[in-house]
Every structure is written in C-alpha cells, then in structure tokens.
Image (spheres, coloured by chain):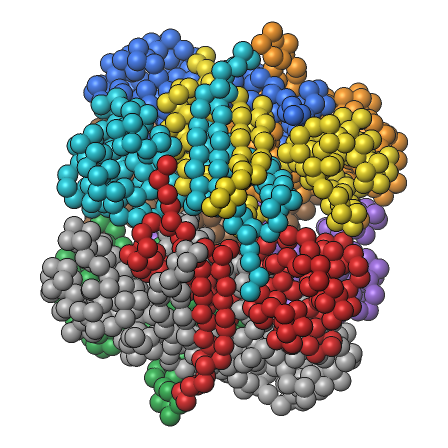
Chain colours: B green, C purple, D brown, E orange, F blue, G yellow, H cyan, I red
Amino acid sequence: MTRLAVTEKIISTKVSKGLSWADVAKKVGQSKEWTTALCLGQMTATPAQAKVLGKIFGLSAEEQKWLMVVPYKGSLPTSVPTDPLIYRFYELVNVYGTTFKELIHEEFGDGIMSAIDFKMDLQRQADPNGDRVNIVMSGKFLPYKQY
Amino acid sequence: MTRLAVTEKIISTKVSKGLSWADVAKKVGQSKEWTTALCLGQMTATPAQAKVLGKIFGLSAEEQKWLMVVPYKGSLPTSVPTDPLIYRFYELVNVYGTTFKELIHEEFGDGIMSAIDFKMDLQRQADPNGDRVNIVMSGKFLPYKQY
Amino acid sequence: MTRLAVTEKIISTKVSKGLSWADVAKKVGQSKEWTTALCLGQMTATPAQAKVLGKIFGLSAEEQKWLMVVPYKGSLPTSVPTDPLIYRFYELVNVYGTTFKELIHEEFGDGIMSAIDFKMDLQRQADPNGDRVNIVMSGKFLPYKQY
Amino acid sequence: MTRLAVTEKIISTKVSKGLSWADVAKKVGQSKEWTTALCLGQMTATPAQAKVLGKIFGLSAEEQKWLMVVPYKGSLPTSVPTDPLIYRFYELVNVYGTTFKELIHEEFGDGIMSAIDFKMDLQRQADPNGDRVNIVMSGKFLPYKQY
Amino acid sequence: MTRLAVTEKIISTKVSKGLSWADVAKKVGQSKEWTTALCLGQMTATPAQAKVLGKIFGLSAEEQKWLMVVPYKGSLPTSVPTDPLIYRFYELVNVYGTTFKELIHEEFGDGIMSAIDFKMDLQRQADPNGDRVNIVMSGKFLPYKQY
Amino acid sequence: MTRLAVTEKIISTKVSKGLSWADVAKKVGQSKEWTTALCLGQMTATPAQAKVLGKIFGLSAEEQKWLMVVPYKGSLPTSVPTDPLIYRFYELVNVYGTTFKELIHEEFGDGIMSAIDFKMDLQRQADPNGDRVNIVMSGKFLPYKQY
Amino acid sequence: MTRLAVTEKIISTKVSKGLSWADVAKKVGQSKEWTTALCLGQMTATPAQAKVLGKIFGLSAEEQKWLMVVPYKGSLPTSVPTDPLIYRFYELVNVYGTTFKELIHEEFGDGIMSAIDFKMDLQRQADPNGDRVNIVMSGKFLPYKQY
Amino acid sequence: MTRLAVTEKIISTKVSKGLSWADVAKKVGQSKEWTTALCLGQMTATPAQAKVLGKIFGLSAEEQKWLMVVPYKGSLPTSVPTDPLIYRFYELVNVYGTTFKELIHEEFGDGIMSAIDFKMDLQRQADPNGDRVNIVMSGKFLPYKQY
Amino acid sequence: MTRLAVTEKIISTKVSKGLSWADVAKKVGQSKEWTTALCLGQMTATPAQAKVLGKIFGLSAEEQKWLMVVPYKGSLPTSVPTDPLIYRFYELVNVYGTTFKELIHEEFGDGIMSAIDFKMDLQRQADPNGDRVNIVMSGKFLPYKQY
Amino acid sequence: MTRLAVTEKIISTKVSKGLSWADVAKKVGQSKEWTTALCLGQMTATPAQAKVLGKIFGLSAEEQKWLMVVPYKGSLPTSVPTDPLIYRFYELVNVYGTTFKELIHEEFGDGIMSAIDFKMDLQRQADPNGDRVNIVMSGKFLPYKQY
C-alpha cells in the first residue's frame, strides 16, 4: 500500500459520493485549503484527523495510518504543468518571479518567504464585471544570516 | 537595441543611484507590483509613463520607445527557478497546484483564474513570531464555455 | 476509477461500434470540436450530456459522474508532440509564434487571445489542387491592465 | 553577417520609426501574416521584396541578400514558450491536439494538415462582450499513401 | 483495448511463429517498408489488409478494427534514441541536417521534403569490403508559398 | 579562432558572392553532399582541399588550417530540430525508426548501418505530380560480434 | 511476452539460485563481458546459446526465442545515470571526452572507435594500495571517407 | 580572464603551430592522456608544468596561473554528446552500463571504480582487418563501507 | 521479484507495524543513517543483516537474498527533487556548490570528497530559537593524480 | 554592470594576486564558508563588508554597491552538475535523499531543514588512512503547521 493509493481512493470516493472539500474541511476542523492538500497527498494528518477522514471516505485502519505518514510532496506530473488552471499560477511565477524577488528584498532584505510556515485563503470575490478569485497568501519571512 | 538592454540599464541605474521600486512606482502613479514588473521588462508603458521612467533612469528617446513595445514575457532563465526566493513560489505551485485546482473548480466550475486580468498587492505583515510576507492576488474567473 | 479510464472506454467503444464524433456531437447537441474534446478528457459535461454519452458509450452511473468532474487537462504524452498531424500545429506555433504576437499586439495592444473564452470550427474546404483543412479560431482578447 | 542580425535591425528600426506591420505588408504586396513572418526571419523574400524592405528599413545590399536566403526556422527561445500570448497557442495544441487529430482523420483519413502549403488570416472581430481575435487557418490535407 | 496492445501481440506472435516481415508484406501486397511500419503501429490498414494481418497474426475482429484506426505516431521511447542502429539515423540528421537543408533549398528553393508523401526502399547491396545497407528515400518537395 | 568562425565566414561569403554548393563541390572535386558538410563544419579537409576553399571563400592561411582540424560534429542547435525541413528527417527517424531496425536486422542480423562508412546522393526527381527529393543512402553494415 | 520479461526472469533466477556471471559465461562459451550484456538484454544469442541459457535459467522455448531476437538496446533508465558505479563511467566521458577525441584523431585522423566491432575485458588488478579495476577496450577504428 | 580563455588559446595555438599532443606531453613529462586533459581545461598543473606549457603555447604569467587553478570540470556542451566519436563512448555506457555494474560487483562487492584515482592509456593496435583503438583503464576500487 | 518490491514491502510493513528506523538500526547493529539507506534500497546487506531485517519485516528467504544484491542506486523520481525537504538539500548544492569546490580545493588541492568512503550522522540540536537539524558528513579526500 | 561581472572580477583578481578564501574571510570577519559564497555571488554584503572586499579586490564604488544587492542565486550552469567534486554532493542527495527525509521526519515530524537559517563548517580531518573532508551542517527545523 502507498499514500498514492489512499489519495486515489479519496478522490474516487469523493466523486462517487458527491462530497465537497469545504464540507470535508469542516468535519476535519481545519481550513479548506490545508484539508484539500492533505486529502491530495501533500500534508500529514493527526490520528484524530485520520479517523475523521477514514469515516468520510471509508478508509481502513491501515489506509488511515498512511494519512499520518509524511508524504513525498509534489502534486504535478510534469515540471511545467499542462493543465490551464495550474499553468496560470506557473505563469505568474514566470512573469512576476523577479518582481516578487525585488519587492520582498526591498522590504525585508536578503531572505525568502517561507513555503512551510505558510497559510493561504482562497475566496470568491463578487464583481459586476465577472466574479474574481481572491487568494491571500501569508508566509513568514526568513532572513539569510551571516555566520 | 532591445528591451533587455533597457531593462539592464534600468536595473544598473537603480543600483548606482540607490533608488527604490516604491519611489519609482509613486512617480509612475501605479502600484509598486505593476511598476516593478514594467521596469523588469514584463509590462508595457504608456508614453507618459515612459517619459517619467526616462527621467528617473536617464533613458534616451529611443530607449523610452522600447518601454512602450509589448515585451516577450518570462523573467526567469530556467523552467525550474534556482533562486531560493523564487523557487518557493514554484514549490507552492507544485505542492498546492492540485489544491488550487480543486477549490477553484468547486467554487466556480470549469475554468481558470486569469493571469492577465489580474492584480496583486504585497505587504509586510507585522508578527511577534517574525514578520510575514502577505500577498493578495485577485484574478478574474474565466469559465470554459460550451459551443 | 479515473477520468482516464472513462476516456479509454469511450475511445475503445467508439472503435468497436464504429461511431463518428460528428454523430456523437449531434446527440450531445454541441459542436463536434467541443464534444470531441469532452470525450477525450479535456472538457466537463453537464449531467444531461453525461447521460447522453453514457447511453452512447455504455457508461455506468459512476463513469458518467467522472464526465462531470473537471479533468486535469493536457492531452499529449510529451512536451514536443511526436505525432506528425499534431506536430504540424506545434510547428505553426514555433514558426508563426512571434508573428501571432506582433499582429495581435499591433491590433489590440498588450494582452492575449483567450484559450478559455475560445471556440473553433474545423471544416473541409474543397479545392481543385487538393482539399484543404479549414480552421476558424475565435478567442476573446484579454488586455493586461495597469493597477 | 547572419539573418538574425538583419531581423534584429528590422525590429529595431520598426520601433524607432514607429512603423506598423500592416503598412509594411501593403508595400511588400503580400498579407500582413506572411510579411511579418518574413521580417521576423521565418520566410524568404524575392529580390523585389527584399528591395522594398531594404528601402523601408534602411538595409544594405548585403542585408537585402540575407532576406533572400532560406532561414533556419523556429522563432521561439524555448520548446515550451514562456510568453503568455504565445503560450496560449501552445496550450491549444496541448488541450485540443488529440481533438484536431480525431476530427481531421474522421473527415480525411490518415494524413496531416500541411504547415507548408498553408496560409492564415488574423482579424479583429467586434463583439459587445469584448472584441475577439479571429484566426482563419487553411492548410492542404496531405494523405499518407501506401506503397 | 489499444493499438499498442495489437502491436505487441503482432510482435509477440511474429517471434513465436518465426515469421519474416518480407513474407508478411507479400501477403499484404505492399512494400516491406510500409507493411512493417503498419505492423509496428505507425500506419493505417484498409479493411482487406486488416483481414490479411488478422489471419497471419491470429487477431480478433476487434483487434483488426484497431489496425484501421489512425494511430498516434512516434515509435521511440526517448527523444534521442538509445538503440545504436536507430541512433545512427539520428546522428545522420545531426551531422547532415544543415547539409540536407542547404542542398534541398539550392535545388528547389524554400520548402521541405514531405515525410507524408514519402516512400522508401531498403536493400542489401553486395560489396567485397562488406555488404552495405542501401536506402532510397523519395519525398515530394513542398514549396512554401507567399500569400 | 575556431572552426565555427571559419564556417560562419564561409556561409557569409557564399551569400555575398552568390555561390552555389554544387559549384564549390566541383572545384573541390568531391560530391556536393560531402563538400557541403565540410563547409558547414562537419568534415575534415585535406591540405589541397583547404587551399581550394581558401581561394573560393577568401580564407587566410590560419583559417585554412582550421578546415584540416577534425571538428566537434553536430550541426543543430537543439536535440529536436525546430526547422521544418530538418524536422521532417527527425520525424522519419521517429516514425520509421523501429521499421529501419526490424528490416536491417531481418536482412543482416544484429548490427548497425554505419554512419561513418557512409555516403549519400541527393537529387531532384522529376514528377508530373510535383517534383520529388530523391536521397540514396549507402552505409556499410557492421555486425555485432561475440567475443 | 517481451525481451524485458526474459531479462527480468534471468536476473531474478540468478539471485534466487545464487549464480555468477563468470560461471554462466563459461557454459555459454563466450567472455563474461559479452555474456552478461546478453543476459541483461543488450546482445543476441545463437540458438545453441539460447538453449544453454534456457537450461541455466529455466527458460521456456518461447523465452529462448526472445534471446535470439535483436533487442532494443540501451540499459539505463535515464540519460544521465543515477547509480554511482555507472555514473563514474559517464563522468569519464564528460571529463575525458574531448581528450579521447583529440588523441584518436591525432593517431588515426577523422573517424571513430567502433562501439560495434568492439570487445572488452574487465579484470581485478592486485595493488598494495587497494586493488584496482582494469578494463581493456578494443574497438576498430573507422575512418570517415570522402566521396 | 578565465580558464576557458586559456584553453581556447592553447587549442588555437596548437592549430596554428601544428603541434601534437604527444610532443606536448613529452615536454610536460606526463602521459599524453593526462596532459591533453590538462590542456583542454580538465586537470590542474604544477607551477613547473604551467611554465613548460607557457613556453610551448606562448602564455602570459597570468595565463599560466590559471593552469594551476582547479577547473570546473566537464568538457562537453550537452549531456548527450552529439559528436560521433564521443557519442560512441556514451553509447558504451548506455549498452554496457549494467554489465560494468554486474561484473565489478561480482568481483569486488558493493562499491565503484574510482574516476579520480584513475589512469588510462590509449594506443593504436595494428590489425590486418583494420587497426584498432586500444584503451586500458585502471581505476581503484572503492568499497561502500557500513557505519 | 526486484529490490524495489522488497523496499516497498519494508516501507509498507514499517507503516502498518509502526516501527522506527532508529529501532531497526539498533537491531541491525549499524547507524540509523546507513540502515535507513539500506532499507530504502540504496545499500547492500550482509547475510546476517538480511536475516535480521527479514525477521523485523517478515521477508521471505528470497526477499532477504535481494537485500544482499547490490542495488541500482538513486532514490529520487526526478533529477530536480519536488519534495520540499529533499529539495532544500538540492538547493544547498546549487547555492553552495561552487563554495564547496573552492574551499575543498583550497585545503586539499585538486580532487573530491568521496561519496563512497563516506559516513554521516544526523542529530537534533536543541535551540531556544527552535531546534535544529545537525548533520555531520565525513568523506575521504581523493586527490587527482598525474600519470 | 551586473553582479556576475563583479564575481568574475573577484575570481580573476584572486587568481592573479594569489589570495586565499580563508584570508579574505578573516578580513571580512565572517566564516570562510559564508564569505566564499558571498564572493561567488550567492550572498549579500553589508556596506562595511563591501568596503573591505573592495579594498582586497580593487573594486570601484559601483562594484561595491553590487555586492550589497541581493543576487539571483544558483551557482551552477546545469541542473545536474558535471564537475566531479560538486556532483558528489548531488549524488549524496540522490542516494541519501529519501534517508534524509525519513530520519528528519522520524525525529521532528512533517517539515524541513531550513536552507536559509542555515550555517556550515568545513574542516580537514586528519586520518591515517587518508585525510577526510568534514562538513557540519546546521539548519533550523521548520514544521509544517495546520491552519
């Protein structure tokens, strides 16, 4: 058994039962962003969370254990994503990558925005010209230190 | 002459004069995010903006014209960025890519978040455990339509 | 179960039953272009469309549900396609890519032709020197906006 | 001297003189699509055309000769284009590639749409919901023959 | 079922029955070059040819149908082939690629040698210094046309 | 100085003087195929040949010496060629690669067609349906031997 | 059935029976280098050799036939090998590649060392500072000829 | 100044003066294999050797210093070499890579043949069927140790 | 059976039994670093060690034999790792690679740090600002020798 | 001017003046590891440090300013390094990557070892069997948090 097998079972069950990530997240008691990443094989569950997910998706005790194992992360099959929705995020990194770099360094000095001590919130933003996707990202700034 | 040559002159002048992107943006009259992307060769200036930048960075009339030409976009030298700050954004796409996809489709149906009708705002967020980088992204949702 | 499995079943059934995409499209009530892309795992069906396809291709209720799930898009096994018919389109992007860019920018300014708010029509064009493939593409122009 | 050097001079002169491809094409006496591709180093000029372009862009006799040499074609710096406008065309190949293949084979049998005996026309299409880019492609169908 | 499965069955049966491509081609009534490419999943059979191959290789009615479906072409697992025999052909393209280009353009002008309206013949050429492989390729010249 | 510099000078001079490869080959006294490959930096000249080429292209004594140095071979800038004429040859390797392999092994057993003890002849073949490119390749068969 | 399946069975049986390649080679009657390459799916057996191997590894008549089929060669899963032992050989090509080239050309002129008319012998070389791997390679020199 | 510049000067001077690596090696007092690798920018010279090379190739004091700096090794422009002579060595790694691995492990256990504590000797081997390239490689075996 | 299958069984059993690598290592009698690499398919066991692991993970006699076979090493699915923890080590090579090179050469001259005669120790280092990962690597210096 | 130009001047001056990184570091007042990375274009200097380096390497005021600009990090020309010394570190990531992952997660849970809040120390370790390179790495553990 592998984590991938558990992920595929979760996705498959979600389709056949018609569940929503938002509902799953409420039952897990965490944000929909983190919970979805967990279910898609990118994060690690506590025993209590694994139990909740086990109930929702009909997972065996062994499958629940795999949710508690730290997974090999990376959710995409190619280094440049082919899916148009995901590619747009890759494109933002490509077009705005050096802009992110300049502005974060201008404000904070040499260092990075953590992708580990990180959280985000994704919401629909009503707009008369067509609703918008609104994403708020927050990552701790980690400075390079001299030694 | 090429746009790249103008970009390099802008960056070089910024270092030697000790300018900040925030100040440049104020004079241009747009956000620091868009203005930095413009100066780094990713966006297109109006004649008035080109003139302002020409004054700030000592650009000739011809160099200003290049700022008004739509550039070949893409600011990174490799498809997987090596710079740690920029890589973290790539990593977010890798780890959260399928999560972005699931949650946007759950909320909006099939389609994408536009990377063109898009804006963002990057701010320092004070935090007793270490200040954070806060990025708000807003992109119009574009639905796939049947035909 | 995965969308890929449903796609493979559709293709396999099409071969064994000797169906045509044009006929399938008529029953679905959409263009042959969009309907084929749907059947090949690139678009998302409404419940009514899934039911029609279920009947044509003998799909179970669960298989029909997968047609209503937004797929991970991208229909080619390699980033440069090896199939000669598909490669010719890739070649057009390679040879005419900068021409597309120059002419669209000349007419519309900075922005892109949407590949989402997009439709196309592919027809045989009779010609005494050998019939031709005629493709009409129509995509909304999306301007980059300053902010 | 190389064709690339001539291409760069043409682009540079176009920016400094503020020319449009449509005007250049009129003087050359061919479509704007073919003429732009010629100027961008993808097509081959007749002596008369080279002379016209030489006048427009101030090219020397030797530079004009290079316009008459068949170029090494391919206008993009990477196999997956980073520029958003050009990427959208690559995305169409990715998402619709197998659809092109199925529909052309359904109509014509085994073979390809020629990218050589090919022409296209790109126009603005007025639309109350936002103007559209309209591209009509026409390529001769070339059948695989048995031997 | 897929075309690949049919190809694998053909190859497997050829080994166990000890058949030769030359004999298969005679029964199919086409050249050994085209027939081998057909059996290896690169060309498309007529119903009569599929029936002949079905008899030779013990293919079911459904497997025969797959021989009549236009395949996704490309017979190699990597973009640079590892097999020494096939690599030598790739090496010829690498070493002589620009020579092909110069000589064909010198003789015909701008255009290509078709790989579709194409045939070839491969023969043993007796030679006292060691027999030689003799390959005659014939492809229609397709000129780029101005428009 | 490098061989590449000599190659570029030869190409540049050929354009400005309007020479043909066929004429150059006649003066060198070898086939147009080998002579073109030599001029394009893929083969090695004898002192006499270098002198002839030096006269034709106005090469200095040192430049002539470089023609006698064995070059680092490989004439293409990318592993999958972008130029349509050269790509067609790559496509032939892709589509017919396994066919070459099967037929040569069927005739000769395990081994390869040499790309070193190799020659070829490229001719125009008149054809009422459009003239054809005719290429005859001849390479010595080299058997793998057991030891 | 495929050659790969036969290779895997040979390797698996070798492990479970605790055989050595040297012993297998003695029974086959060829060098351990060639015999190992044969067993690993890179060379082609005679009927007599296939029978011997069939006995050693318990191969069926059909599996023995596959040993007599010329395999698609190339034994490594990636173009740059990850295994440290094999990588060292790749590193030698990288570091000494141009040295091989210079010295072989200096001694023999333009041409190559054949990898087909090739044999090698690998031995332990006792050494007080630590035993050494000693490899003797012998490949026929093949000259490029003018034509 | 860089090591690459010194390497290019050495190669250029060797061509114009018509030197041989064997002669250079004799003057340096080391093998022709190691000396050639040194001159091609892969090894590091002692001050005395740098002086000798300085004299042979007319190198300035600063250029001689660069010969004493440990270079960034790797002499090939692509990860799969395009030059036929060098490719044959890459092919040997590809075809015989797993054979090297099996036989060295069979003789020595887990470990590698060092590419650092390594030497080689390349000689012409007279042969009535055509002379052969004979290469003797000797590398220390380095065992993996448990800890 | 393959080593990979044994590795997967070990990992799977570890999850279902809730074992720790530290405990496994104690029973094997080696460091946790080496023992984990062994269990993950990168090192080779002695018969005694294979027996111990067989007991812990319920491996059959044949599975234990595979632990004693030298594996094809390399534990990552892509050449640039996607997993954030492992990527950080890749990033260290990218950012500090030339620094490693300069400092080791400055101290030892031309040569390398062995990755074979190598050991390491990974410990938690308590720290009031957040505990740290402490890794001590020790590899024998191997000098390039002249010959 | 660019940071790369400053880096090249530093390296060039170091060679011509015969400086050592250890001495440079002492004058800068930081470790030799961090200081070398700074000089090689991977870290950012304070004004005081830039002044010290300016004196050592004869840098102009503008060149010193570039040392204070955060650089685009990544010191290697290819994603898999060709230099043997640096490759060994890449090999360690390849062979031990999953071991690092398992042991850090076993000790700390889900998270990473920071490559930003990181320091290291590289020393010669005397050893009768040959001196060793000893590297101590210390990076803060950063846990993934739920949100």
Q: Quadrant of the C terminus of chain F?
A: top right
Task: State the residue lying farthest toward the top.
Answer: E128
Is residue C15 shown left or right of residue H54? right
Residue B84 in view: yes
The answer to which quarter of the image holds residue H116 is: top left
- The picture places residue H142, in percent across and down from the top left corner, at 52, 50
Task: Please report the residue visible at 41 percent of the width from the left and 89 percent of the height from the top.
Answer: I128
Pick the residue in front: H95 or B132: H95
The answer to which quarter of the image holds residue F51 is: top left
Give the answer, above or below, for where H54 lies relative to F142.
Answer: below
- The picture places residue G128, in percent across and down from the top left corner, at 49, 44
Pick the residue in front: F52 or F1: F1
Is residue I70 shown left or right of residue F115? right
Task: Please report the residue visible at 66 percent of the width from the left and 59 percent of the height from the top.
Answer: I45
- The picture places residue I82, in percent across and down from the top left corner, at 53, 64
- The picture places residue G7, in percent across and down from the top left corner, at 73, 42
Task: Please report the residue visible at 20 percent of the width from the left and 20 percent of the height from the top.
Answer: F60
Q: Quadrant of the N terminus of chain F?
A: top left
Residue G89 in view: no
Is residue B57 shown left or right of residue I21? left
